[in-house]
């Protein structure tokens, strides 16, 4: 924010002086006396009113400063929002990274040949009572199995 102070703040500016000179010239030469007087009056009025304008300028500066502060506050709020978004993005990125690691670990752990071998050696069955998945040796004929979770005993053929 920049505030430009004009010369007019200090009363007699160049335009007022020139118009006064022209007014005096017109008045003295009697070329256009009334116009000359009008111009003289105008230039005096201008120099006086520009002081008032200067006062208004001070008010203007104050208003502008206030506006500037508000603008800065708005920017600050926007920045805080951006920071929050950034934080959220970081959290999301972290979550994605964690998920990716979990998935890659699962892929690493997933060994299809191993599970095939196990399937050949064992049978996977579930407890009739609690539905707990149980791994039992294969090819042992009729066996009595005990559930590892609920300890219920049941017979089955392997
Ligand atoms: Zn069970």
Image (spheres, helix red, strand yellow):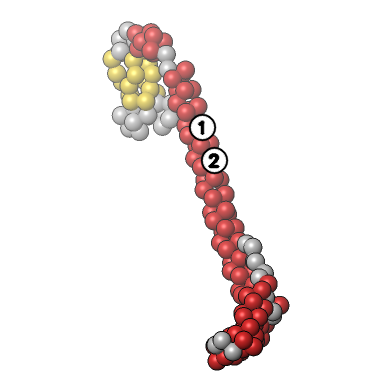
Considering the image in quadrants, where does the N terminus appear? bottom right
Residue 8, image x and y in percent?
A: 66, 75
Is residue 152 depicted above or below 19 in this figure?
Answer: above
Q: Nearer the viewer, residue 99 or 149?
A: 99
Total numbered circles: 2
* Mark 2 beta carbon near ligand 1 (under 8 Å): no
Residue that protrudes farthest toward the right in the picture? 10
Indicate the quadrant where residue 157 lies.
top left
Residue 149, image x and y in percent?
A: 43, 30
Indicate the quadrant where residue 64 lies.
bottom right
Residue that protrudes farthest toward the left in the picture? 157
> In front: mark 1 or mark 2?
2
Q: Nearer the viewer, residue 125 or 140?
A: 125
- Residue at 40 percent across and 26 percent down: it is 147
Q: Is the residue marked by circle 2 packed among few (<14), some (14-19), or many (20+) residues within 10 Å?
A: few
- Residue at 50 percent across and 27 percent down: it is 101
Q: Which mark is residue 98?
A: 1
Residue 82, image x and y in percent?
A: 54, 50
* Mark 1 beta carbon near ligand 1 (under 8 Å): no
Helix, strand or loop under label 1: helix
Q: Nearer the viewer, residue 1 or 46?
A: 46
Q: Is residue 38 visible?
A: no
Instruction: Determine which residue is flagged by label 2.
Output: 90
- Residue at 51 percent across and 42 percent down: it is 89
Helix, strand or loop under label 2: helix
Does label 1 or label 2 sit earlier along the sequence?
A: 2
- Residue at 57 percent across and 58 percent down: it is 75
């Amino acid at each position: 924010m920049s505030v430009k102070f004009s010369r007019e703040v200090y009363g007699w500016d160049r335009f007022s002086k020139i118009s006064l000179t022209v007014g005096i010239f017109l008045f003295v030469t009697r070329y256009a006396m009334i116009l000359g007087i009008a111009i003289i009056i105008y230039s005096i009025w201008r120099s006086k009113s520009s002081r008032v304008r200067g006062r208004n300028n001070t008010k203007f500066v104050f208003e502008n400063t206030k506006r500037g502060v508000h603008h800065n506050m708005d920017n600050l709020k926007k920045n805080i929002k951006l920071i929050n978004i950034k934080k959220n993005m970081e959290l999301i990125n972290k979550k994605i990274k964690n998920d990716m690691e979990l998935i890659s670990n699962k892929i690493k752990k997933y060994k299809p040949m191993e599970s095939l071998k196990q399937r050949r050696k064992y049978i996977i069955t579930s407890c009739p009572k609690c539905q707990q998945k149980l791994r039992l040796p294969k090819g042992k004929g009729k066996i009595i199995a005990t559930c590892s979770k609920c300890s219920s005993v049941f017979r089955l053929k392997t």
